Image: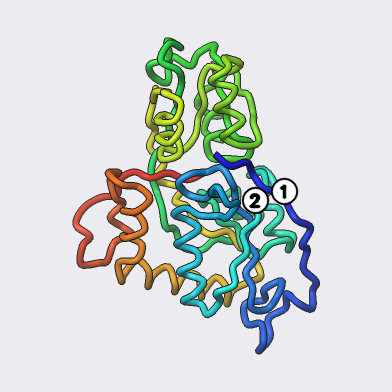
Amino acid sequence: MAAILALSGCGGSTASSSPSAENPYGLIEPGTIRVASLGDSKPYTFTDSSGNFTGFDVELFKDVAHRAGVDNVVFTGQDFSGLLAAVANGQFDVGVAAIGITDKRKETVDFSDGYLAGYLTVITTKTSGINDADGLNGKRLGVVQGTLQEAYAVKNFTSAQLVRFPDNNTAISAVNSGSVDAHFLDYEAAKEYQEQFGLVSAADIPSFDAPAGFAIAKDKPAFKEALNKGLAEAMEDGTWKKLYEKWFPGSPMPEQYLPKAEQTSSPSPTASK
């Protein structure tokens, strides 16, 4: 998988980011949405062989941005641990990376409505002897710094030794080399690594209480309203469903994001960070 791209220094000025007739969303650069993202979080956000960002979240956000009247969307990668702060301090207009909405994160940024909800997964090698969450006792468990998985592990995997990494690729390399025993990440990303490296799932953990949303600065009400409107339209006209089927083939589909006429039961997996 592609490595995370370098963070560009693109702080916005007060003048350019203030709402106006020419810039109703208060963007750093009128007519352009600058997005902080991840380059290694397949199938949500990742860079392809040409270095271009793609994935479920990328395509969904571009669709929502188009509905808001903005087609120039620039994605830049960085470590997840600094992503929300970069949005809050005006380096980026929005963070897009399957970011789970939590009360703690709301202290730093605001969020759009949710668009994904699901599971977290512990993956390991076939020979590690870890078969469930209890098997993590006394083991070295990788987590990406700043994620929901890190927060969950700190609270619930108290007998495991947590090893923090800047991204999933680095953590998976550590699993494969034996320097950590397992890695804790989201459900869909785990599937990709299992297929690529022959790893196995030791535990799938529900995380429906923290759906993913687009992270924005707190003083952007018009921008938030436009994103929420675009998301609602994309869900109701079936665009969200088509993208989900494209990027998560065979995975259970969370019904709360389907057109209202197709909603019949309770939500099912796809995860956030």
Looking at the rendered structure, the secondary structure element under dot 2 is: strand
At 31% from the left edge and 57% from the top edge, which residue is drawn?
256
Write down the quadrant of residue 179 in the picture: top right
Q: Position of residue 190 (x, y in %)?
A: 44, 34
Q: Where is residue 158 in the image (x, y as percent from the top left)?
A: 55, 21
Q: From the viewer's perspective, tell me whether residue 79 is left or right of residue 10.
A: left
At 32% from the left edge and 60% from the top edge, which residue is drawn?
242
> What is the residue that sits farthest to the bottom in this orientation?
21
Q: From the viewer's perspective, tell me whether residue 260 is left or right of residue 180.
A: left
The residue that mark 1 highlights is: 6
Q: Earlier in the sequence, mark 2 or mark 1?
A: 1
Disc 2 crowd, CA 10 A, few/some/many (<14, 14-19, 20+): many
Write down the quadrant of residue 56 in the picture: bottom left
The CA span between labels 2 and 1 is 6 Å
Give the camera-side residue of 197 and 144: 197
Tag shown at residue 77: 2
Q: From the viewer's perspective, tell me whether residue 269 is left or right of residue 134.
A: left
Looking at the rendered structure, the secondary structure element under dot 1 is: loop
Q: Which colour scheme is used?
A: rainbow
Q: In this view, does 190 lie above or below 68?
A: above
At 65% from the left edge and 56% from the top edge, which residue is drawn?
76
The answer to whether mark 2 and mark 1 are in CB contact below 8 A is yes
Disc 1 crowd, CA 10 A, few/some/many (<14, 14-19, 20+): few
Counting labels gives 2
At 52% from the left edge and 43% from the top edge, which residue is drawn?
41
